């Protein structure tokens, strides 16, 4: 019996040593000077035990700490998950512009049942290129004008709803912004209203919110990230039910719109009952598109519609929430921005703005860029590497998830001096001569897989913020309030954004 125990212990030690050598010795053939080094943690678990017991906000803090401690480039593993975290502009530039890094990291696999192989999640190069080409016209100037009119209407609804909180001691504005962006993204992507801001019983809206919550839980849960554990959790059953509800909703809209197009062809259609509008939606572009002479299937269209909805909802919500927080915290910036808004757009609180109107800001542009720097909506972007690649003298090893730490890079003091301070002027024309790597600031990613909807997002952020500031003066309910951050795929404030509103005269 003792012999068996000894054999087991020796075998276990052997496995641990082998795992450690395999994981950390992958760069040795290139020499130690080219290896990416990092904390070992506890073999064979690596950093897994440390992160397994941490909360979502603690996990994000740990990731930031490791990035800073290891000079913004480190390689580590958490059990069977191998990754390299990098937050250096020179390396990120290569990764974003080298086609060997086009494949998405395995972290995105948790989204597959819902989003399948849409533009955000697809890894295969030919399919990604085809879909990118199809979707590019959706962000043409003329289409954006239609989208902006949707934003105008929904922003008017939002400000009317917010009126009930005028002179309150404080309220969390995050849920209201989330419902506003949900209304915008659904109408612009599918051409149908979901009335998220006014209909508290919308089953589609509830399903999207709940399935997102489950997916973010899964991303954080050390074991549930893998299918073999996930399939036994009660969350999976609920997740599948919600995804089916979402798909059924989208498919119904697709089929209805396809039938209407077949019936009416060249005629303009407008039916309030089924939510079809004369203005173009992303869905219309997809229905009119062909690949090798063939129309896209309902499944192809569903993939891209759901991808656009997912990518354009939480990301824009995050950007708007943190911008409002920064404006409430920095009263001098808010006042200067309000004066520019009045100068550019006038004092009519209900006026409809155009793309050109929203393109005439200078100070607003600086404020938005600085807010996106401090609170990058997608703080970490993931890629997967299938071959060893040398970048700037170090070797990125194959079979690793490559995590691009945009949040860490944007707060790196070697890239942005006084990185924790909110200084919009660092993006002024007067400082444009300062030499910086073009990839040192990429809140919408960059290179081949840059965000196709970044112009859409910027217009939406500017429009709704301008409308809010025209109607209200913002203050923090607690002058010392600081958001507690968590990062799944999207940066979010765990404790909300609690503000006070005062009416503008």
Image: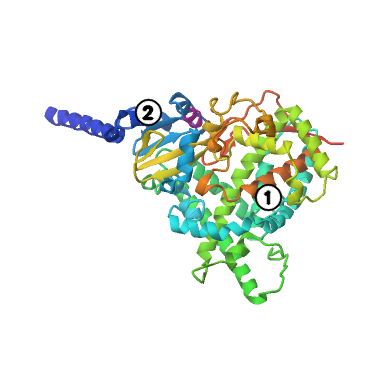
Spatial separation of the CA atoms under disc 1 and disc 2: 48 Å
Say whether residue 309 is left or right of residue 7.
right
Name the quarter where the C terminus is drawn. top right
Q: How far across and down, in percent of the image, does residue 349 sit?
A: 83, 44
**Above or below: residue 190 compared with residue 50:** below
Residue 200, label in figure: 1
Q: Residue at x 53, y 38 (%)?
A: 439
In the rendered image, which residue does mark 2 sit on? 38
Of helix, strand and loop, which mostly describes the magenta segment?
A: helix
In the image as oriented, which residue stretches furthest toward the bottom?
A: 263
Say whether residue 435 is left or right of residue 192.
left
Q: How far across and down, in percent of the image, does residue 28 sit?
A: 28, 33
Which stretch appears magenta? 59-64
Q: Residue at x 48, y 56 (%)?
A: 128
Say whether residue 183 is left or right of residue 249.
right
Q: How far across and down, in percent of the image, does residue 280 sit?
A: 67, 62
């Amino acid at each position: 019996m003792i012999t068996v125990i000894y054999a087991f212990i020796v075998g276990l030690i052997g496995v641990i040593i082998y795992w450690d050598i395999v994981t950390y010795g992958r760069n040795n053939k290139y020499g130690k000077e080219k290896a990416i080094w990092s904390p070992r943690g506890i073999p064979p678990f690596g950093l897994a035990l440390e992160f397994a017991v941490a909360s979502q906000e603690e996990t994000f803090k740990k990731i930031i700490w490791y990035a800073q401690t290891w000079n913004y480039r480190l390689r580590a593993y958490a059990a069977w998950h191998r990754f390299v975290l990098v937050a250096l502009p020179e390396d990120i530039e290569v990764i974003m512009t080298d086609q060997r890094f086009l494949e998405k990291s395995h972290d995105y696999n948790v989204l597959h049942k819902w989003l399948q192989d849409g533009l955000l999640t697809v890894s295969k190069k030919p399919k990604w290129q085809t879909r990118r080409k199809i979707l590019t016209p959706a962000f043409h100037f003329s289409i954006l004008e239609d989208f902006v009119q949707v934003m105008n209407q929904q922003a008017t609804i939002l400000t009317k709803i917010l009126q009930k909180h005028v002179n309150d001691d404080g309220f969390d504005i995050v849920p209201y912004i989330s419902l506003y962006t949900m209304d915008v993204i659904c109408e612009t992507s599918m051409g149908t209203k979901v009335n998220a801001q006014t209909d508290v019983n919308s089953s589609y809206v509830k399903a999207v919110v709940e399935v997102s919550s489950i997916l973010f839980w899964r991303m954080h849960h050390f074991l549930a990230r893998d299918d073999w554990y996930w399939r036994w959790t009660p969350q999976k059953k609920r997740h599948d039910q919600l995804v089916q509800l979402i798909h059924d909703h989208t498919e119904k809209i697709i089929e209805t719109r396809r039938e209407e197009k077949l019936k009416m062809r060249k005629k303009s259609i407008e039916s309030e009952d089924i939510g079809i509008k004369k203005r173009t939606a992303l869905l219309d572009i997809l229905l009119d598109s062909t690949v090798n002479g063939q129309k896209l299937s309902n499944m192809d269209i569903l993939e891209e519609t759901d991808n656009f909805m997912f990518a354009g909802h939480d990301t824009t919500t995050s950007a708007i929430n943190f911008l409002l927080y920064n404006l409430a915290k920095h009263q001098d910036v808010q006042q200067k921005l309000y004066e520019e808004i009045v100068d550019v757009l006038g004092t009519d609180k209900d006026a409809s703005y155009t793309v050109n109107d929203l393109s005439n800001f200078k100070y607003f542009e600086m404020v938005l860029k600085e807010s996106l720097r401090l609170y990058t909506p997608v703080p970490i972007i993931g890629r997967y590497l299938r071959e060893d690649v040398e970048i700037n003298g170090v070797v990125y090893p194959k079979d690793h998830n490559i995590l691009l730490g945009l949040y860490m890079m944007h707060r790196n003091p070697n890239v942005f001096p006084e990185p924790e301070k909110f200084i919009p002027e660092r993006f002024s024309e007067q400082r444009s001569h300062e030499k910086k790597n073009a990839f040192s600031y990429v809140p919408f990613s960059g290179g081949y897989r840059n965000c196709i909807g970044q112009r859409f997002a910027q217009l939406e952020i500017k429009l709704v913020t301008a409308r809010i500031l025209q109607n209200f003066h913002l203050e923090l309910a607690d002058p010392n309030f600081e958001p507690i951050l968590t990062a799944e795929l999207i940066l979010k404030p765990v404790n909300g954004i609690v503000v006070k509103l005062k009416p503008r005269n």
